[in-house]
Image (tube, rainbow, N blue to C red):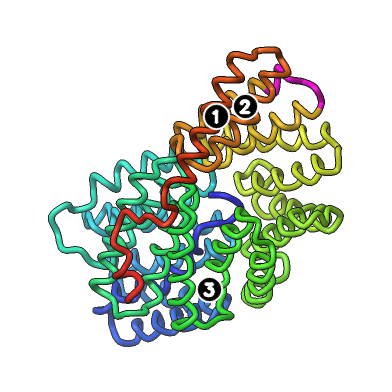
Amino acid sequence: MTWLAKLSGVAIVLLCAPLFADEAASLGQLVATARQLTKQARYAEAQMVFRKALAEVERAGDRSLLARVTNEMAALVLACGDLPHAEELYQSAITIWEELRDEKNLAWALSSLASFYADEGKVDRANTLVTRAWRTLPQNGPDDVTVAWTLEQLAHVAVETGRYSQAESTYLRAIAIRQKLMPAGDPSQAKPIAALGYVYYVLGRYPQAELLYLRAVSILEKSLGGDHPETARVRLYLAELYLREKQYGKAQQLATEAIPSLQKAFGADHIQVIPAMLCLASVYYGERRFEEAEALLQRVLHGYETSVGKENPRMVPALNALAAVEYAKGKYEAAELLYLSAIRIQQGAQGRLHDTLSRTLHNLGLCYAAQGRYQEAEAAYRSSLAIAEQSFGAAHPDVPVIIADYAAVLRKLRKKNEARALEKQARELRARLDRENPSRLEVDWRELRSR
């Protein structure tokens, strides 16, 4: 994803409650206590209780229940920033489900680890696990919470690897399952709704994205409270959308509201707080408050370097944002180096067709053009356009912008015929986007509004 991480793994603890309907009473009380602490954003205490539950399950010798608690514990420690421990727990859960030959729960565990690898830019590992999960998931069995969660994880990997149509259909199926099984307003419904909103955001379908984000925020505010970190995270989805629409006042308000909630739950500079800081820095950039933006972005980059390392995909949005600040200040060489660093990480970790790579290349082209390096700008624009058209299609709002800038560089290179053709294409695409009803919906959203 962009600088905004997907809805935290902490949400999994809230989503999986029906999975433990049959455990022993004392153990069930431990798990219920851990979930309640998570719901209250008391994550350190929740981890302690989960550890005690794991010890109790191991003593009891219930391998199936051990795998369930292990998978749930993995989601919690992942959200709290302990990536190596989370990976270890996910792998342990997979091993147990394989031993038990439980296909449905194995698919759940495989998809969980695949989602983890996708977030870390380990696309090959993620795709291998996704293939196994789809083959393992029973096709004719009843839809339940385990199936819904598995589908959500698989859809997330599809987003991270640029398969947006598959992500859309998979999220819609997960939403339908949760709405069928859960009472209206249950917090578990918010995650797939917000995630589907992100798919539409990436595809440039902003009205649909906003509708879904607002619905998810409403569910979480009513069920968990306005100051809960899960509510804060979905508000950051909205903030990112408003940034794209240059509604800086709305974006700043959402980011400012999110930061205290996240800091209270995780600590001042925890990795879960950094996306909100990056959002606020982007607001400062949009308002041309470059010194404030740069100071905050340096803090963001330091936080990511300390927590996940310099080559992690989470670095990319912050590098792009700082490059934009340097470009705006006329420091083109500094901006170029930052854009190149971001491109290297994206190509090496996330694959060529990630949704931010096209924009990074476009911005690099602007940087080259500002320095009079038009041939290099042409190459950057050409790559940016190819990725955007392959990833999003010609109807995406970014495409005519890239084409127009590409045409301007071709004129500088005296390639007038090519420039005219691209200028005509940009005009036609803009007219098409203007003609089309931006609120046109391809699925029936009335049910989502009424739930």
Q: Is 108 left or right of 73, judged from the image as shown?
A: left
| Residue lying at the far left of the rendered structure | 140
Mark 2 packing: few (<14 Cα in 10 Å), some, or many (20+)?
many
* Residue 127: percent from left, percent from top: 39, 40
* Residue 384: percent from left, percent from top: 58, 30
**Mark on residue 349?**
none
* Residue 277: percent from left, percent from top: 70, 62
Do the CB atoms of the residues marked 1 and 2 lie less than 8 Å apart? Answer: yes
Q: Is 50 left or right of 148, judged from the image as shown?
A: right
Amino acid at the residue labelled 3: Thr
According to the image, label 3 marks what residue?
A: 231
Residue that appears at 58% across and 76% down: 44
**Mark on residue 385?**
1
Residue that appears at 41% across and 76% down: 53
Q: In 3D space, how far apart are the residues under numbered discs 1 and 3 (Cα atoms)?
A: 35 Å
The quadrant of the picture occupied by the C terminus is bottom left
**Mark on residue 381?**
2
Which segment did they paint magenta? 371-377
Q: Is residue 370 above or below residue 444?
A: above
Mark 3 packing: few (<14 Cα in 10 Å), some, or many (20+)?
many
Q: Nearer the viewer, residue 428 or 189?
A: 428
Q: In 3D space, how far apart are the residues under numbered discs 3 and 2 (Cα atoms)?
A: 38 Å
Give the image quarter of residue 70.
Answer: bottom left
3 or 2: mark nearer the eye: 2
Asked which secondary structure carries label 2, the reply is helix
Q: Is residue 175 above or below residue 373?
A: below
Do the CB atoms of the residues marked 1 and 3 lie less than 8 Å apart? Answer: no
Asked which secondary structure carries label 3, the reply is helix
Q: Is 331 left or right of 336, judged from the image as shown?
A: right
Q: Nearer the viewer, residue 131 or 352?
A: 352
Amino acid at the residue labelled 2: Tyr
